[in-house]
Image: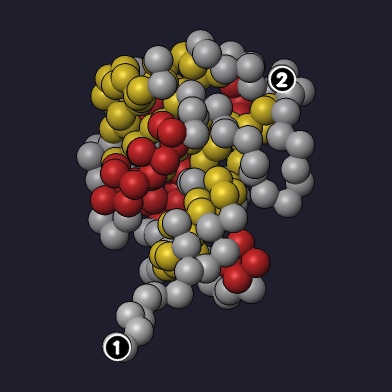
Amino acid sequence: MAAIDYPPHYTYEDYRLWEGKWELYDGSPVAMTPAPMISHQAIAYALARELGNSIEECEECLVLGGEDYKLSDDTILKPDVVLICNEPNDTYITKAPEIIIEVISKSTARNDEKYKFGRYEAEKVKYYLLVYPDDLYAKVYRLIDSRYDKQGDFSSESYIFEDTTCKSSIDFDKVFKRFRKK
């Protein structure tokens, strides 16, 4: 009887050695290439700046972009923007961020809308935002009773994140303003 040839199962120790941008989904590597489009990166930066400005006086929280979030030894995700508070580790994110923002690319949409949605919900990330740069709007989800509840679609409104260590907000009109066609 021939042995079944299973695909390799990778861990954080393997992941640390890889070159380029990767994520690790339950032991399976996921390449984050090609690099996101300029508008994707610019919108992620605008979101991080807007969120960061709203917590400027807060000493407990940080806004970061593109950092490793280690859910387990075989699952490492790299959200576009996060709000973390009282994180004890300086190498990677270990606690569930209070806010995670993923800017949708055509090549990653399914992962962000399905796989990461479920993982972040299970990890009890308080807020998950899916941002659609082509359409200039964001879907905001809030964790209520261990399930994500859609708070709405936002393109020119502000949203206040009430359930965070440091009250924070995003003015989506400011974020998307420069990307709107005149």
Q: Position of residue 140 (x, y in %)?
A: 35, 25
User: Quadrant where the C terminus lies?
Assistant: top left
Q: Residue at x 74, y 24 (%)?
A: 60
Seen at 57% across and 64% down, the residue is: 11
The crowd level at tag 1 (other Cα within 10 Å; few <14, some 14-19, many 20+) is: few
Q: Quadrant of residue 107?
A: bottom left
Q: Position of residue 57 (x, y in %)?
A: 72, 18
* Mark 1 residue type: Met
In the depicted structure, whether residue 181 falls above or below residue 91: above
Nearer-N-terminus badge (2/1): 1
Q: Which residue, as the protein is rendered here, is positioned at the far top?
A: 162
Q: Is residue 181 left or right of residue 19?
A: left
Indicate whether 175 appears above or below 146. Answer: below
The residue singled out by tag 1 in the image is 1
Whether residue 156 appears in this view of the structure is no
Quadrant in the rendering for residue 151: top left
Q: Please name whichever residue, 82 or 138, is drawn nearer the observer in this view of the structure.
A: 82
Q: Amino acid at mark 2?
A: Cys
Point out residue 70 in the picture as x, y percentages from the top left corner: 59, 49
Q: Nearer the viewer, residue 63 or 45?
A: 63
* Residue at image location 53% in from the left, 58% down from the top: 74
Which labelled disc corresponds to residue 58? 2
Does dot 1 land on a helix, a strand or a loop?
A: loop
Q: Secondary structure at mark 2?
A: loop
Does the rendering let one see residue 8?
yes
Q: CA distance from mark 2 to mark 1?
A: 62 Å
Please identify the quadrant where the N terminus is shown: bottom left
Colour mapping used in the image: secondary structure
Front in this rendered view, residue 168 or 88 = 88
